[in-house]
């Protein structure tokens, strides 16, 4: 018999109407065969009757027949799955139910067979189905087309619902008023309309059984149809996912904490970020109190007060706060915050005493309040600990209508605070390092530029290292003898502390060399030797030195309108001095150009880039750039020299800007040809702009010529004051965080008037000493400085006498009245006088000793004509 092809497989149900019956005797022999059995297994009745049941099954299931027969005799029947073999050998997977057919005392068995080829499975009896839904741990309910409950299982009661009989006929909103019934019923209507099931719809709320605890559930909805396919209602299931929901919330909170806490390195900002992140996700009111030394960047100590560093509340204005941010948070002895601070352990209280007063003392305004008045009922206190040190405490509060803190909340708070503690400690360490760096920077750069009559000066400095505020660029103004000033701007390769330390050594060396009153090219020559020698002593030669940023683009600025050397600057009205140092004369202390060195202006090629962090400050100084300018306000002459550094710009009195045509020497310490200087005659009111190359180029693709043009345009813009002009230039050319350190020094030149300078030629005759004293005394009377006549006559007498006695050639006496009274004697000698300490019996040798006692300072400088011995007196009081 062949299989029946036309039967409806969708109606394969395990009941008598659909099953193929057959009869077995007590020994398992087929005694009755039906047409349905014939259609199912293809055996005719004559073939099947007399066969054993085992013969109709596969070998595997045939071995089970004795066991199944025993179970049938013991239980009165059996139901399960077996595989039969059709005639011809094809297998047939069957659902089998065996029941007793004993009616006359003869043991017989009725076997019902149903094919499983395309059937969904075995239909179970109603008692079995009732057991499944009743004992299921998942909440199950059925609503009709009006969305009224018509059936539910007992498990639904665990979700805070009423018992099943009380739910009958009620809508969802009547059963659970604390949940969003409208949204849930909207899902049910959608399923009724479309017939498409909705799986794992999540909702969060408060069930009737736990109104103070937020719970989360997933619901799945399926439509139920009758035999005609019309909707009868909706079958839905409910699963409690509160713990999973809270775990997701905790992870989300920790993720937000990692994203929003510690975005900066400000301690108070970090504390406030902690409070902002935790409200309202974890608490309703939070305070963050830090030890006062922590806010200063110092190491924490318990013998100091706590300071409120941050706080937040779900209520606008933080009405619960009794201490404002920035004020001292003083707690009563023995209160939980102080215990947690000292012991370094957390503390939790589910229910605060509502009538207990708050823990703080010394509250501004004498305010007092109980926890009941503040609406606070549950609390956690977590110490802020990082790297083994306690930095402060964080206190979490909840208000009336929320569940109290539990152990999971405390664990979450500890994780949150521990992450924030690392950020707070990083901010503390940064604050400490930054303060130390700023102290170092302030000690390396001038606190203020000294006041003098030669120039009006201002400067602006901006480091590239925003964390430490340290850089390798520097500027300086150094008063020299004869009312002259030295203007210096330089830069060291790299950034940070190493560059700043190297810069400090260079600045000190420059000030020391400036005190010798040497020409600019000689100052740079000695400075170059110092850098190279220090690098050699520490094992870093020029071949290992890093290049200077100033070496790039430092060639002569053609067409600037300012000429160096002798002659007149065409079109500028600025005359070059005739006494520029010859370029073929090596500077003192410098040898000739070593083999293989580059030509001037190409010093950058001499330095190979290295990591500045791996160098000492001496090695770091190799490749530095520097420009040294000396300005004389008596005659307006300006001499300058550069070592691998951009040439200064000059803002002429009419506002036009020109760049000095300055020969470029090699960067410091890398070796090369001697330095050269130029002299310019500057008109009164001209402004010198000395700058580092941080103002010229920022980023790739910009040429230095373009940067110089941008600088020219910025310098041409006028401003009310020199200081405003300096800041405007830096702001327009450099971003808030520049790519390179930068410094700009603006010096507006002045000329001393004829009434401030007096000079006389003194014949080489000892008798002229008295005339020189008289001339000086008359000049002091004209200046109204009669009180200084005695000391000035003594100084003039000693200096002129020494010049007449030890020098040859012309002698010239000059008095200059500026902020000090200066006396200078020029002679053609080449030997410098030195201070002696004569014995009591010596007849002479006391001249310079007297000068040193009466003068504020004195010294010698060499000029092309010879030397100048000078002495200065303070004009604040005679003899000072």
Image (cartoon, rainbow, N blue to C red):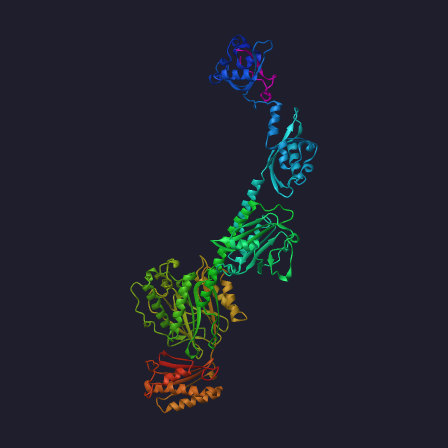
Q: Magenta residues, as a range?
A: 1-26
393 on left or right of 487: right
Nearest the viewer among 41 and 148 is 148
Q: Is residue 20 magenta?
A: yes
Q: Is residue 554 visible?
A: no
As drawn, the residue found furthest toward the top would be 46
Nearest the viewer among 828 and 293 is 293
* Residue 324 rendering spot, x and y as whole percentages: 60, 59
In this rendering, the count of numbered labels is 0
* Residue 786 rendering spot, x and y as whole percentages: 47, 88
Nearest the viewer among 374 and 708 is 374
Q: Is residue 371 visible?
A: yes
Residue 635 sits above or below residue 31 on the image? below
* Residue 316 rendering spot, x and y as whole percentages: 64, 54
Nearest the viewer among 350 and 636 is 350
Q: Is residue 816 magenta?
A: no
* Residue 727 rendering spot, x and y as whole percentages: 51, 66
The residue sitting at 40% across, 91% down in the picture is 771
Residue 728 sits above or below residue 41 on the image? below
The residue sitting at 36% across, 89% down in the picture is 763
């Amino acid at each position: 018999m062949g299989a029946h092809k036309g039967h409806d497989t969708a109606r394969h149900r395990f009941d008598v109407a659909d099953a193929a019956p057959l009869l077995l005797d007590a020994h398992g022999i087929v005694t009755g065969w039906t047409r349905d059995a014939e259609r199912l297994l293809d055996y005719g009745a004559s073939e099947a009757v007399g066969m054993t049941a085992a013969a109709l099954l596969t070998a595997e299931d045939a071995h089970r027949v004795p066991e199944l027969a025993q179970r049938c005799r013991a239980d009165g029947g059996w139901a399960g799955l077996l595989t039969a073999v059709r005639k011809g050998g094809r297998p047939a997977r069957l659902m089998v139910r065996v029941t007793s057919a004993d009616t006359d005392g003869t043991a017989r068995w009725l076997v019902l067979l149903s094919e499983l080829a395309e059937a969904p499975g075995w239909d179970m009896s109603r008692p079995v189905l009732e057991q499944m839904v009743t004992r299921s741990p998942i909440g199950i309910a059925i609503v009709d087309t009006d969305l009224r409950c018509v059936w539910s299982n007992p498990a639904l009661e665990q979700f805070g619902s009423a018992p099943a009989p009380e739910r009958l006929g009620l809508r969802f909103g009547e059963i659970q008023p604390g949940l969003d019934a409208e949204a849930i019923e909207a899902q049910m209507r959608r399923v009724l309309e479309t017939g498409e099931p909705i799986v794992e719809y999540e909702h969060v709320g408060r069930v009737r059984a736990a109104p103070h605890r937020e719970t989360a559930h997933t619901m799945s909805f399926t439509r139920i149809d009758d035999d005609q396919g019309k909707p009868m209602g909706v079958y839905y299931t409910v699963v409690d996912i509160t713990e999973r929901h809270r775990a997701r919330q905790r992870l989300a909170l920790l993720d937000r904490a990692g994203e929003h806490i510690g975005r900066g390195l400000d301690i108070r900002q970090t504390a406030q970020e902690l409070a902002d992140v935790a409200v309202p996700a974890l608490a309703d009111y939070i305070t963050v109190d830090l030890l006062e030394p922590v806010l200063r960047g110092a190491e924490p100590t318990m013998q100091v007060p706590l300071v409120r560093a941050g706080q937040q509340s779900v209520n606008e204005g933080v009405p619960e706060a009794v201490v404002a941010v920035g004020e001292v948070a003083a707690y009563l002895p023995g209160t939980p915050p102080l215990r947690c601070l000292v012991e370094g352990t957390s503390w939790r209280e589910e229910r605060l005493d509502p009538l207990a007063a708050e823990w703080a003392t010394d509250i501004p305004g004498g305010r007092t309040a109980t926890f009941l008045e503040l609406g606070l009922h549950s609390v956690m206190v977590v110490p802020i600990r990082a790297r083994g040190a306690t930095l402060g405490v964080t206190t979490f509060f909840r208000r009336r209508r929320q569940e109290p803190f539990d152990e999971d909340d405390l664990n979450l708070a500890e994780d949150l605070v521990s992450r924030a503690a690392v950020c707070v400690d990083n901010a503390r360490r940064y604050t400490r390092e930054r303060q130390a760096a700023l102290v170092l920077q302030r000690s390396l750069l001038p606190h203020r530029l000294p006041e003098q009559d030669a120039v009006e000066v201002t400067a602006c400095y901006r480091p590239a290292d925003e964390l430490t505020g340290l850089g390798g660029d520097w500027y300086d103004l150094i008063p020299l003898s004869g009312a002259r000033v030295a203007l210096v701007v330089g830069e060291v390769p790299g950034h940070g502390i190493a560059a700043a330390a190297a810069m400090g050594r260079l600045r000190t060396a420059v000030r020391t060399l400036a005190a010798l009153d040497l020409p600019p090219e000689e100052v740079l020559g000695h400075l170059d030797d110092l850098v190279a020698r220090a690098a050699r002593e520490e094992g870093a030669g020029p071949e290992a030195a890093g290049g200077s940023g100033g070496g790039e683009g430092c060639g002569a600025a053609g067409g600037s309108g300012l000429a160096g050397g002798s002659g007149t600057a065409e079109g500028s009205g600025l005359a070059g001095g005739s006494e520029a140092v010859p370029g073929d004369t090596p500077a003192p202390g410098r040898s000739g150009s070593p083999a293989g060195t580059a030509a001037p202006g190409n010093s950058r090629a001499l330095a190979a880039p290295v990591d500045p962090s791996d160098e000492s400050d001496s090695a770091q100084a190799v490749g530095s750039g520097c420009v040294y300018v000396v300005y004389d306000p008596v005659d307006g002459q300006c001499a300058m020299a550069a070592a691998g550094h951009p040439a200064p710009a000059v803002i002429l009195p009419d506002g036009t800007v020109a760049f000095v045509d300055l020969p470029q020497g090699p960067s410091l310490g890398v070796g090369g040809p001697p330095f050269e200087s130029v002299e310019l005659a500057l008109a009164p009111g001209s402004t010198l702009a000395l700058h580092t190359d941080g103002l010229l180029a920022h980023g790739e693709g910009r040429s230095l010529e373009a940067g110089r043009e941008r600088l020219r345009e910025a310098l041409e813009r006028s401003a009310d004051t020199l200081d405003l002009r300096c800041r405007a230039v830096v702001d327009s050319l450099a971003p808030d965080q520049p790519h390179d350190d930068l410094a700009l020094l603006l010096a507006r030149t002045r000329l001393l008037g004829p009434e401030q300078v007096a000079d006389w030629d003194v014949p080489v005759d000892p008798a002229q000493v008295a005339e020189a004293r008289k001339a000086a005394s008359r000049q002091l009377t004209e200046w109204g400085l009669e009180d200084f006549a005695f000391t000035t006559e003594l100084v003039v007498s000693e200096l002129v006498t020494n010049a007449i006695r030890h020098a040859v050639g012309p002698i010239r006496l000059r008095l200059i009245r500026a902020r000090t009274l200066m006396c200078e004697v020029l002679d053609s000698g080449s030997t410098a006088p030195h201070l002696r300490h004569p014995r009591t019996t010596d007849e002479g040798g006391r001249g310079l000793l007297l000068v040193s006692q009466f003068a504020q300072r004195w010294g010698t400088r060499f000029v092309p004509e010879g030397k100048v011995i000078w002495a200065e007196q303070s004009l604040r009081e005679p003899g000072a």
